[in-house]
Amino acid sequence: MAIRTWASRLGWPPAPASTVRKSPASGVGWPGGGAGSAPWVVAAPVIGASTDDEPTAPEADVSRETEAPVADHAPDSEAGVSRETSPAVPPTPEPTPIAAEAERALRVRNVDLGNRFPSPAVTRVLTVANQKGGVGKTTTTVNLAVALAVHGCSVLVIDLDPQGNASTGLGVPHHSGVPSIYDVLIDNRPMLDAVAVVDAAPRLHCVPATIDLAGAEIELVSIVARESRLRRALAKYLADLRASSVDPPDYVLIDCPPSLGLLTVNALVAAREVLIPIQCEYYALEGLRQLMSNIDLVTAHLNADLTVSTILLTMYDARTRLADQVTREVRAHFGELVLESVIPRSIRVSEAPGYGQSVITYDPGSRGAMSYLRAARELAGRPAPDASALSARADRAPAAAAR
Ligand SMILES: Nc1ncnc2c1ncn2[C@@H]1O[C@H](COP(=O)(O)OP(=O)(O)O)[C@@H](O)[C@H]1O
Ligand SMILES: [Mg+2]
């Protein structure tokens, strides 16, 4: 409704209407319904009504219970005022679907207009990589993308995992037959054909992954320039946009599969930056040495500009000493590459993809949403990396796995 009209007025990218597909407003509709079910009926983002129940993370890293849902964007005088005691925010126990959607649209629009993140001078291409599964790659990709987009940045998410979880999390169809990153990589289909509009925020788009991508690792082996397929396709896409006099996206976020195969190599070759999510759990650093050495190989032979620019600590559980231990160890090792913002373990974060949403649209006031908003702000506030300087700073071999 309002948000859609507004989004379409902004109209990025410029692809002809016939080439840009619209994702269903209702996302994937799980649980309890098909594509037409309405996720907001189950969990509308009611101001002051976050039901987040995750433990508290360190005070500098996660939002406070008393923080208003849009405190990032509220005037200073309102910061820190308890939502429970604010007379201006009466409780709204059961919003109607229309009211909930209107509120969400307003929230997104106000965030965008009131508090834009700086746009980079040139498109920043970040690969979100870690060959361990379940560390928060997809969750980070989806939520950073939405956070950046609701703050006025144009963002393209490329789902490079055959599981298609990023597509699911953004509410983009990715069943077999949908134009996808597989067609781009294997069949030379222009990326413009596979770009889908994401409803969550204006100027947010996604190239989905279908299950076909599962075979791509093997199919790529016999294709010429197999490591550079994504880089070439992305370069052509950006050139196509420029040829149509449309600004290229501010950010391209590539969600990697949990492996170091050819798909991940393609992502590393296509990007300028690597963002590594590290889970605050046992064996957090295990495997990082291998990831770093693969990144070094890519840097040496295929993409000299590549650098690890950002590390994000995820699934922080304040109840465990281990989380602090991992946090300290990662910060000691990677220094300023590690974002100050830490993502807490949060039920709301894990629920959101089930409704085809990011936590930022699913429950904007939750700690998970606030943490991702802060992380996105940090990311956007950092200058695009100087590859040589950052490479020198990042010692590529983590000292020891946290145990
Ligand atoms: N901060 C978090 N709190 C709770 N659950 C999370 C959090 N981040 C991710 N998850 C959940 O953990 C699982 C793995 O996350 P995911 O982003 O898919 O990891 P990866 O892409 O690295 O495999 C998913 O079920 C996701 O919903
Ligand atoms: Mg994933």
Image: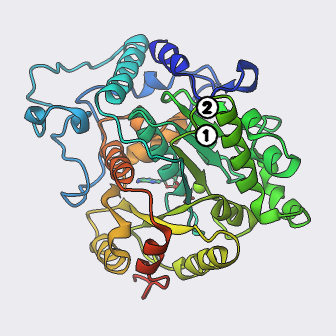
Does label 2 point to a residue whose CB lies under 8 Å from ligand 1? no
How many C-alpha atoms fall within 10 Å of the one at disc 1: few (<14), some, or many (≥20)? many
Q: Is residue 196 left or right of residue 311?
A: right
First in sequence: mark 1 or mark 2?
A: 2
Name the kind of residue labelled 1 in the image.
Thr
Nearer-the-camera pick, 155 or 82 = 155
Q: Looking at the image, is 321 positioned above or below residue 364?
A: below
Do the residues bearing badges 1 and 2 touch, measured as CB atoms within 8 Å? yes
Q: Secondary structure at mark 2?
A: loop
Does label 1 point to a residue whose CB lies under 8 Å from ligand 1? no
Nearer-the-camera pick, 258 or 92 = 258
Nearer-the-camera pick, 146 or 59 = 146
Q: Measure how far apart labels 1 and 2 are at the Cα level.
A: 7 Å
Q: Quadrant of the C terminus?
A: bottom left
Residue drawn at 35 percent across, 42 percent down: 369
Q: Position of residue 302 (x, y in %)?
A: 70, 71
Q: Which residue is mark 1?
A: 168
Q: Secondary structure at mark 1?
A: helix
The circle on residue 5 is: none
Name the kind of residue labelled 2 in the image.
Val
Residue drawn at 30 percent across, 51 percent down: 54
Q: Position of residue 267 (x, y in %)?
A: 66, 60
Q: Which residue is mark 2?
A: 28
Residue drawn at 52 percent across, 77 percent down: 288
Residue drawn at 37 percent across, 23 percent down: 109
Quarter of the rendering containing residue 270: bottom right
Q: Looking at the image, is 312 positioned above or below residue 122?
A: below
Q: Position of residue 332 (x, y in %)?
A: 31, 79
